[in-house]
Amino acid sequence: MGCRASIVWPVMCAALFAALSFSPANADKRIALIIGNSNYRHAGVLGNPANDAAAIAALLKASGFAGVDVRRDLGIAEMRRALGDFSEAARDADMALLFYAGHGIEVDGANYLIPVDARLARDFDVEDEAISLDRILRAIEPAKRLRFVMLDACRDNPFTKTMRRTSRSIGRGLARIETTSSDTLVAFSTEAGTVAADGDAATSPFTSALLRHLATPGLDLRIAFGRVRDEVMKDTNNRQRPYIYGSLGGSTVTIVDAPPIAPVVVAPAAPIPDPCSAAEVHWKSAEAIGGKAAYQDHLARFGSCNFAGLARARIVAIDLGEKALAEANERNKHAEANARRIQNEQESAAAETLKKVEAERRKIEAERKLVETERKRVAALPPAEKPARSAATGFDGVWTVTRSTAPGCGPKGGTFTIRVSGSVVKGPAGTGSISPSGAFTAPGKSNHFTGTLRGNSGSGTYTGKCTGTFTVSRN
């Protein structure tokens, strides 16, 4: 239900007037009350109800309704008066139709239509300030053949947001109903408990669908409303599903009766030439050519003649052959691609292996050259002489070194040991040497010792951290 009231509805209805310019075939009296409430004084303006009401009124007038009463922006007193007048008119009517567009509300399971002067400050006020659906059904009850109510009144209701509530429940949209009178239909623009869409056109999605299907000549109301339902669901992406309550008898009930059917005059039939007379000759030509196009041409010309089945069989065989050939080509293509891939992988693996073998060969060759070079170097060395027995071997053993006193070297008599083996002297801090004559050197922890051994004793001096003399004796 869009709010763009500036769109002029008569343009939309002009085509309907032309299509529905005839009167109903029967002499039934058909009346309608159309109410469009747009300008709510305490809840803002609804743009479409006035357009919806005007468009439906124009449709019913063009459909042969004898009395169409159009009312807009009714307050509570005016709505009650309009319903009373309509109920009086329904006493001698065969069909009574009421269409309402505007706000509606459900309180404690009962449905109400809201006049434009309603405040509804409290849920307690709804019986005083709104018109119940039960009252509307009582108003149209006197009609003899059909009582039909259409409510485009399930819009998002602003009153429910500001209304002070007691313990009463207020629903979203309208509540389900049960009609008690036969041949009574009540159509909701959307199913119970949901809100109808405003839409973007000059009339609501529900009213737009009614304008297209309700007055289709000869179309039963139940089928017409089924088409309305399908169209609204499609236009709203299934967010809005119109619903109808009540039941009718087994006879067809229409808003506009079907126009009388003119008798059909059948002219004498002219002799019909045989369409297959040239089929055999054409088939022989197609067989001689043997291509798919030739068989297709035969089917186009003689699709219902004797050779049509053979032509179809030939086309199927050609298609199967082409398909098999294409599949074989595709398999060959895949096989060739796989073979190339495997060959590339094998060549790549062989190249990598060859590269590794070559690197290993070069490594071995380099190592061989190093070994050969070392062998040649060793071969070029002079022959090693047999080492002579050191003359110092007579000093082998452990010796005790006793230092004399010296500044910074501790008290007199500081000792440590050295070991003589051949020409080697091992002291506390490293290795020294000894000559065959007994002259030796030995490193200490802080000083260097130089002396001479004779027999089982000896002496010498030391330098380094401090300077002094020492004596030595064999242990």
Image (tube, helix red, strand yellow):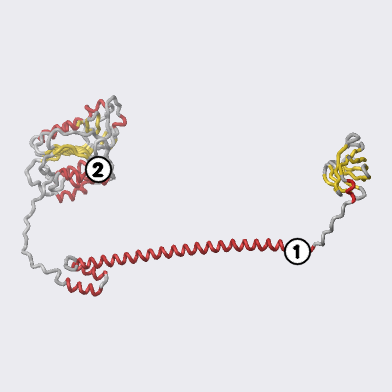
Residue drawn at point x = 8 percent, y = 66 percent: 270
Residue type at mark 1: give it: Lys
Residue drawn at point x = 22 percent, y = 30 percent: 110
Residue type at mark 2: give it: Ser
Q: How far apart are marks 1 and 2 (CA)?
A: 110 Å
Secondary structure beneath dot 2 equals loop
Judge by depth and name the residue closer to the eye, 413 or 243.
Answer: 413
User: Which circle marks residue 376 in the picture?
Assistant: 1
User: Which circle marks residue 198 in the picture?
Assistant: none
Q: Where is residue 159 in the image (x, y as percent from the top left)?
A: 29, 32
Tell me if 28 is positioned left or right of 242 in this view. Answer: left
Residue 82 visible (yes or no): no
Relative to 194, say whether 393 is above or below: below
Tags 1 and 2 in contact by the CB under 8 Å rule?
A: no
Relative to 190, say whether 306 is above or below: below
**Image quadrant containing the N terminus:** top left
**Image quadrant containing the C terminus:** top right
Secondary structure beneath dot 1 equals helix
Which numbered disc flags the more N-terminal residue, 1 or 2? 2
Residue 255 visible (yes or no): yes
Residue drawn at point x = 73 percent, y = 63 percent: 373
Residue at image mark 2? 204
